[in-house]
Image (cartoon, rainbow, N blue to C red):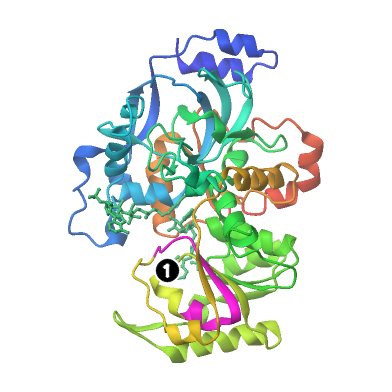
Amino acid sequence: MTVKDILDAIQSADATSEDFAALPLPESYRAITVHKDETEMFAGLETRDKDPRKSIHLDDVPLPELGPGEALVAVMASSVNYNSVWTSIFEPLSTFGFLERYGRTNELAKRHDLPYHIIGSDLAGVVLRTGPGVNAWRPGDEVVAHCLSVELESSDGHNDTMLDPEQRIWGFETNFGGLAEIALVKSNQLMPKPDHLSWEEAAAPGLVNSTAYRQLVSRNGAGMKQGDNVLIWGASGGLGSYATQFALAGGANPICVVSSPQKAEICRSMGAEAIIDRNAEGYRFWKDENTQDPKEWKRFGKRIRELTGGEDIDIVFEHPGRETFGASVFVTRKGGTITTCASTSGYMHEYDNRYLWMSLKRIIGSHFANYREAWEANRLIAKGRIHPTLSKVYALEDTGQAAYDVHRNLHQGKVGVLCLAPEEGLGVRDHEKRAQHIDAINRFRNI
Ligand SMILES: C/C=C/C(=O)SCCNC(=O)CCNC(=O)[C@H](O)C(C)(C)COP(=O)(O)OP(=O)(O)OC[C@H]1O[C@@H](n2cnc3c(N)ncnc32)[C@H](O)[C@@H]1OP(=O)(O)O
Ligand SMILES: NC(=O)C1=CN([C@@H]2O[C@H](COP(=O)(O)OP(=O)(O)OC[C@H]3O[C@@H](n4cnc5c(N)ncnc54)[C@H](OP(=O)(O)O)[C@@H]3O)[C@@H](O)[C@H]2O)C=CC1
């Protein structure tokens, strides 16, 4: 039995759940990995010079054992998230430490502690097998998977599953991720695949859409409301392209920051009007490595006021981190919110705290999304209210190049990866719904 037989079943119009359940599983499959014995390969290099193409491998790996509450999924497509870039450059730390720590928790978790890490935190595909105790999903179901892995044995996570002490990001802090022909997930990660999207389109939003939803919309994040001025860094990037859509769909006013006229045009075509090209306008928030320039914060704030008719920012959607955080705190209005989920340019932030406390601003830390938030975010994709922002699609063997593009900020929106899908455009079930949204679905394609 090979993965080819699985693909044939997926592509045949009449395979039943029983047919899928009867398919023998292959002993091995192809997966994108990083290797534990290579974690020092970039030692001494600057972050930008660490090249994912050198550390990312395509290997044949054995199929993991299926445990209770889990599912094996045939992955038709996945996407590149920045967490896979972090894994591939072994920053801020090697993800093998996460796998070792997880492996120590129980007998079944030991499976994750391997000399290779199968990465990837998104997938669209078809359920192959479910473990004991799984009733909601059956072989043959077409699904996407969100990346929240939790144990829920502690009450700490019972109101908000992100607060579980054993919270992990699948494919980053666990093994058997989505950049592979087969993935292992907890069945609670599964959600229905939006039926108007192709496999690669359906695999693109998951992680970033859910994260932007919690960070910006949810009451666990900024709780955005109609009329809010929302400053969105990287507004056409992975997170930002969803934050921009949420702001527009929720009646807020996005102020989109981008770094090229082309990216400005994408934001304009999504419906945004207030756009700042940080490159063209040449903001230098840091005079040197250790000194910020408040005059530049003010110049930036003045530009925002020009675009808003004199108003300041209600919510900053932060993720660049060190480079922008001082400016973000400054331009937020009295009582406003800075919500952050990352620190791409450096995690030791510096800001003038006087502007925070004297103006009663709040900083909110946000990370991925809880089960419910991930479900609600996927529902909005399925209803055609929020659209995938897929630009380019790579073959599985070219994942290193795809991760390189994201690391060097050469991409737009989201970058997709075909895993089992032999070509783009397959998997669409509701053509009528697709036709209604086709322009929005294709907005980021091939630019
Ligand atoms: C969905 C996608 C998301 C993204 O893309 S996010 C971006 C990618 N992700 C990242 O870059 C994050 C990577 N993760 C990390 O960098 C690390 O993951 C953390 C810095 C978040 C945490 O580091 P750690 O080493 O896991 O934890 P510690 O808390 O620094 O060290 C653990 C030790 O510290 C002790 N400790 C914890 N809290 C306290 C306290 N309040 N007082 C005293 N000690 C404390 C513990 O007990 C334990 O100790 P003992 O090592 O001896 O077991
Ligand atoms: N905690 C969580 O749950 C999550 C965290 N993340 C993290 O968020 C970060 C961004 O992820 P994602 O949006 O997918 O990545 P992308 O690279 O797709 O987009 C980020 C955008 O931010 C802008 N940007 C990058 N560096 C800077 C800078 N120094 N100053 C200003 N703008 C900058 C760029 O846009 P432009 O050049 O146009 O300005 C870039 O396109 C990553 O670090 C990732 O790990 C992501 C998802 C979830």
* Closer-to-camera residue (192/263): 192
Place residue 250 in its image quadrant.
bottom right
Q: Is residue 80 something one can see in this rendering?
A: no
Q: Which residues are magenta?
A: 327-344
Q: In this picture, is 320 found above or below 141?
A: below
Residue at 45% over, 9% down: 1
Q: Position of residue 101 (x, y in %)?
A: 29, 39
Q: Position of residue 223 (x, y in %)?
A: 65, 63
Residue 125 versus residue 384 in the image, above or below = above
How dense is the environment of label 1, judged by Cα within 10 Å: few (below 14), some, or many (20 and up)?
A: many
Q: Mark 1 belongs to which amino acid?
A: Gly
Residue 36 lies in quadrant: top left
Residue at the bottom extreme of this rendering: 295
Q: For residue 399, what is the image quadrant? A: top left
* Residue 430 % position (x, y): 77, 33
Residue plotted at (27% across, 47% down): 94
Q: Is residue 425 left or right of residue 331?
A: right
Determine if the C-beta at disc 1 is less than 8 A from ligand 2. yes
Residue denoted by label 1: 321
Residue 395, horizontal then vertical, whole percent: 47, 36
Which element carries disc 1, helix, strand or loop?
Answer: loop
